[in-house]
Amino acid sequence: MEKNEVIPAFEMLLDEIDAVVMALNEEGAQLLTAGKYADARALIAKVESINAIRVKVQSLSEEWRRLSFKTVKKPGRKPRQAKLKPTARLGKGMRTPEEAFKLPLLKTLIEMGGAGRVSEVLDRMENHVKPMLTEPDYEPLSSTDEFRWRNTAKWARQELIYDGLLEKDSPYGIWTISDKGRAWVEKQSQEPMPYNIHEKQTKIQFPGDKNESADRPVALEQIIEVCHEIFNNGRDYNEAVKLVAMRRGLKSVHTVYDKCTRQLGLTTAEFKAVTEDKYQMIKFLIDRFPNYQSYIVEQLGP
C-alpha cells in the first residue's frame, strides 16, 4: 500500500470521531438546558475520553506522514484497493491540517476586537484561509453537513486553548484571544518577509552543522517547507505553496512561488519535475546551497 493511501484513512477516522464529539456536545447542551446536570457531567467526561483518543489518532497520523519509504509490491498479487465509506469521501489532495488555521484564527479574532461568536469568526476567517483550502476542505461532514475546514478550525481552536493563546473560560459559543495569543501574533508579524535568496533567517543551530552557518537563507527554508508538504503530506505543488505562504503569514503566495522558481533558475514545470524524485531534489538543493548540506539532508532525507 502506498504511504499516501493510508493518510485518507486517518483523515476519515478523525472525521468520524469529530462527528461523534459534535453529536455528544449537542446532546450535552440539551441536558444543561433541561437542568440535568449530573447527566451532562457524565457526558462531558465521555467527550473528554474521546478527545484523548483523538489526540492519539492525530499523533499517529502525523507520525505516519513523517515516514519515508518505498512501496513494496509482492509479485503475483494485485494491490488491495481500500474501500472507503461514501459518507467520508475525500477529493483531490488532502484536507488542510489544524496547524495551518491557528494564525488566521487568531488574526481574525484581533480584527473582531478580540472575541466573536463561533459562526461569525469562521465566516470572516474564510477570507484569510480560502487560498489554501483544498477540495476535501469544502466537503460537508456526513453528520452535520458542516464544511470539513470549519470543523478542522474548531479543533485548531482547541489546541490554541491548550497553548494558552485563547481564553479557556470564554462564554459558551464565544471565542476570545488571550494576551499571550496577541503577543504570539505580534511576534509572527515581526518576522521578516524576504524576497532575496541570500536574505538570512534567525540563527538556529542544528546538529551536524559544524562547518555551516546557522544563518540559513529564508528562501531555502521556504523551499524545503514546500518539498515537505509534497513529499510527506501528499500535497500538489500549488497546495503546498499556498499552505507555506499562509503558515508564514505572507501577504502573497507569489513570494513562495518566486523562491521555488525564479530564484532557483527554474520554471514551474521544471520545479515540479524535480519534485517527482525526492533524492533528485536533495541533490539539486545541495548543488544550489552547498553550505547547508547537513540541514537539507536532515530536513528531506533519508
Image: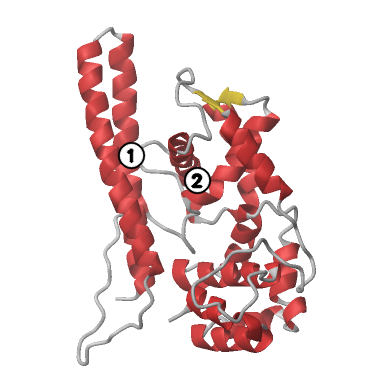
Outermost residue on the top side: it is 35
Q: Residues within 10 Å of mark 1 (few under 14, many from 20)?
A: some
Which labelled disc corresponds to residue 197? none
Q: How is the image coloured?
A: secondary structure
Percent from the top left, x then y, of residue 211? 60, 82
In-front residue for pair 218/41:
218
Judged left or right of residue 241, residue 101 is left
Amino acid type at circle 2 is Trp
Looking at the rendering, in which quadrant would you find the C terminus? Answer: bottom left
Q: Is residue 271 above or below residue 185?
A: below
Splitting the image into 4 quarters, where does residue 74 fall?
Answer: bottom left
Q: Earlier in the sequence, mark 2 or mark 1?
A: 1
Give, as a three-letter code, the residue at label 1.
Answer: Ala
In this rendering, does residue 125 appear at all?
no
- Local secondary structure at mark 1: helix
Q: Which residue is mark 1?
A: 19
Residue 296 in sight here? yes
Q: Position of residue 139 (x, y in %)?
A: 47, 49
Instruction: Quickly name the residue at label 2.
Output: 149
Of residue 191 and residue 270, the one placed in the foreground of this image is 191
User: Which quadrant would residue 132 be assigned to in this image?
Assistant: bottom right
The answer to whether 140 is drawn above or below residue 43 in the figure is below
Task: Name the residue nearer the viewer: 155 or 137.
Answer: 155
Secondary structure of the residue carrying numbered label 2: helix
Alpha carbons under labels 2 and 1: distance apart: 13 Å
Quarter of the figure with the N terminus: bottom left
Q: Residue at x 27, y 25 (%)?
A: 44
Q: x, y percentage for residue 213?
A: 65, 75
Residue farthest to the bottom, as pictured: 75
Q: On screen, 100 above or below 37? A: below
